[in-house]
Every structure is written in C-alpha cells, then in structure tokens.
Image (tube, rainbow, N blue to C red):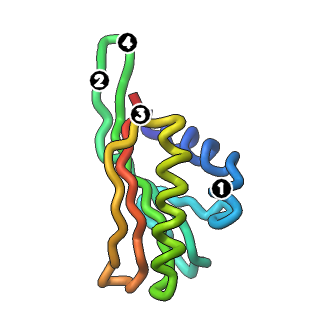
C-alpha cells in the first residue's frame, strides 16, 4: 500500500502541467536531501488503515516549499494543487506556514485516499 500510493501520487502529479510547470519532477518522500532546487514538493503518508475487508485507506500530507520571498507563489500554488488533488483524493485541509528552521514557506495539504 505505501509504495503503491507513493508511485500513484508521483505519476498523478507529474502528469499535470499545473504541477510540472512549477515543480518539474521535484517531488520527494518525506524530505528532500542534499542540495536542491526550489521550489519543490514533499509528501508524507501519515496513516494506512483497513477501511473495510475489501479496501485500504490512507491519509497523507503534501508540502510545497518556496523561498522566503515567495509567499504569494506558495499560496497560489497550494490553492491550485488543492483543486487538482481533489479530483483524485478526498480533501481534508490546507494551510501555509513558515518553517522557522529553514526559512522557507510551506504550503500544506492533507488528503485521504479511500
């Protein structure tokens, strides 16, 4: 389930120009290691559970990282990704925050795959 969700998410995002025009293929599980080009995206599967005897559900978090001078771009991109991701996953919530550790804006979307 974990690997399949990761593969499906990557394929879905990189098949849409609204994602690739900004992020290209810069989407990483949990954390982007090393010297990276920004903006970039990360995702974290937060929970996998048995939804029923025939299906498994999962919740996950998408994060979109933009530089300190790119608040508007972060907000606009996060809103665009909410619209896109809602076509495939159940939307739970979204927000934008400033990571004080990295001094990057972080657009966050919480989703569920049923």
Q: Which mark is residue 50?
A: 2
Q: Nearer the viewer, residue 83 or 107?
A: 83
Q: How far apart are marks 3 and 4 (CA)?
A: 14 Å
**Is the residue marked by circle 4 packed among few (<14), some (14-19), or many (20+) residues within 10 Å?**
few
Instruction: Give the mark, 1 or 3, whose residue is nearer the N terminus.
Output: 1
Q: Name the residue under label 1.
A: 18
What's the distance in space between the residues labelled 1 and 3, CA to CA?
21 Å
Secondary structure beneath dot 3 equals strand
Are the two marked residues, 4 and 2, in contact with CB atoms closer than 8 angstroms? no
- N-term-proximal mark, 3 vs 4: 4
The quarter of the picture where the C terminus appears is top left
Q: What element carries label 2?
A: strand
Which circle's residue, 2 or 3, is located before the other in the chain?
Answer: 2
Say whether marks 1 and 2 touch (CB < 8 Å). no
Question: Residue 54: which disc?
Answer: 4
Position of 66 with respect to 93 (left or right) is right
The picture places residue 36, in percent across and down from the top left corner, at 58, 77
Residue 87 position in % (x across, y down):
53, 36
- Give the CA separation, mark 1 to mark 2: 32 Å
In the structure shown, which secondary structural element does the residue marked by tag 4 occupy? loop
Q: Quadrant of residue 94?
A: bottom left
Mark 1 and mark 3 in contact? Answer it, CB < 8 Å. Answer: no
Q: CB of mark 4 within 8 Å of CB of mark 1?
A: no
Residue 105 visible, this angle: yes
Contact, mark 3 vs mark 4 (Cβ under 8 Å): no
Residue marked by disc 3 = 113
Foreground mark, 4 or 1, reads 1
Q: Which residue is drawn at 40% across and 36% down?
A: 90
Residue at 54% x, 56% y: name it: 80
Calculate the distance from the C-alpha at mark 4 to the C-alpha at mark 2: 8 Å
What element does badge 1 sit on? helix
- Name which residue lies at 29% across and 41% down: 47
């Amino acid at each position: 389930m974990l690997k399949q969700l990761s593969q499906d998410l990557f394929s879905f995002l990189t098949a849409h120009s609204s994602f690739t025009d900004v992020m290209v293929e810069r989407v990483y599980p949990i954390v982007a290691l090393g010297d990276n080009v920004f903006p970039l995206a990360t995702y974290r599967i937060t929970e996998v559970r048995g939804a029923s005897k025939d299906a498994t559900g999962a919740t996950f978090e998408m994060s979109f990282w933009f530089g300190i001078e790119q608040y508007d771009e972060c907000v606009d991109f996060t809103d665009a990704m909410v619209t896109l991701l809602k076509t495939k996953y159940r939307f739970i919530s979204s927000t934008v925050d400033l990571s004080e550790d990295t001094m990057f804006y972080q657009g966050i979307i919480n989703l569920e795959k049923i």
